[in-house]
Image: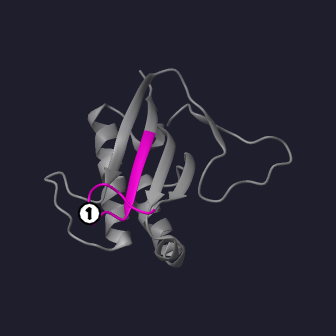
Amino acid sequence: MTSHQAILPEGWPKPNGYANAILAAKGRTLFLAGQIGWTPDGKFHSEELLPQFEQALKNIVDLVSAAGGKPSDICKMTCYCTDRDQYLENRKQLGIIWKSIMGKHYPCMSMLFVSDLLDHPAIIEIEATAVISD
């Protein structure tokens, strides 16, 4: 169980699938570079959004785990996606993938739609910040 706390001002509606603010517990701050949907050996197994999202999210969790943390230590994520329509069409399936990897933990999140990503055929890139309790 993490001691990070979601902050929600009185009268604000509860966000769906993210937190507006997280108050992080004391610990070590881990900054994660953008992770894309390739495997640890640098190979893409799909050019589709859903498998790339799943792999990128697994890469994030693997990095957090390697630092001694767990998914619930992730406080902030920023996602960059090149295909807004594909993202919106697959929100339900993206949520299923999210829950299979992250459970019911929803950090602060931003989604940005961009024209391109550096490594082709990447469709999505996820960067994150975690605070890992000592």
Looking at the image, which residue is at 33% across and 74% down? 48
The quadrant in which the C terminus is found is: top left
Looking at this view, name the residue that lies furthest to the front. Answer: 115
Of 36 and 20, nearer the camera is 36
Q: Is mark 1 on a helix, strand or loop?
A: loop
In the rendered structure, does residue 113 fall within the stretch colored magenta? no
Looking at this view, name the residue that lies furthest to the left. Answer: 41
In the rendered structure, does residue 122 fall within the stretch colored magenta? yes
Q: How crowded is mark 1: few (under 14 residues within 10 Å), some or many (20 or more)?
A: few
Residue 130 placed where, x, y %? 45, 35
Horizontal side of 96 relative to 22 (left or right) equals left
Of 75 and 120, nearer the camera is 120
Looking at the image, which residue is at 52% across and 49% down? 105
Q: Which residue is labeled 1 in the image?
A: 120
Which quadrant of the structure image shows residue 54?
A: bottom left
Would you place residue 72 above or below residue 14 in this image?
A: above
Which quadrant of the structure image shows residue 33?
A: top left
Looking at the image, which residue is at 30% across and 31% down? 67
Under mark 1, the amino acid is His
Residue 30 placed where, x, y %? 39, 30
The majority secondary structure of the magenta stretch comes to loop
Of 130 and 43, nearer the camera is 43
Would you place residue 106 above or below residue 90 in this image?
A: above
Looking at the image, which residue is at 46% across and 22% down? 27
Residue 55 placed where, x, y %? 30, 59
Q: What stretch is highlighted in magenta?
A: 115-128
Horizontal side of 19 relative to 32 (left or right) equals right
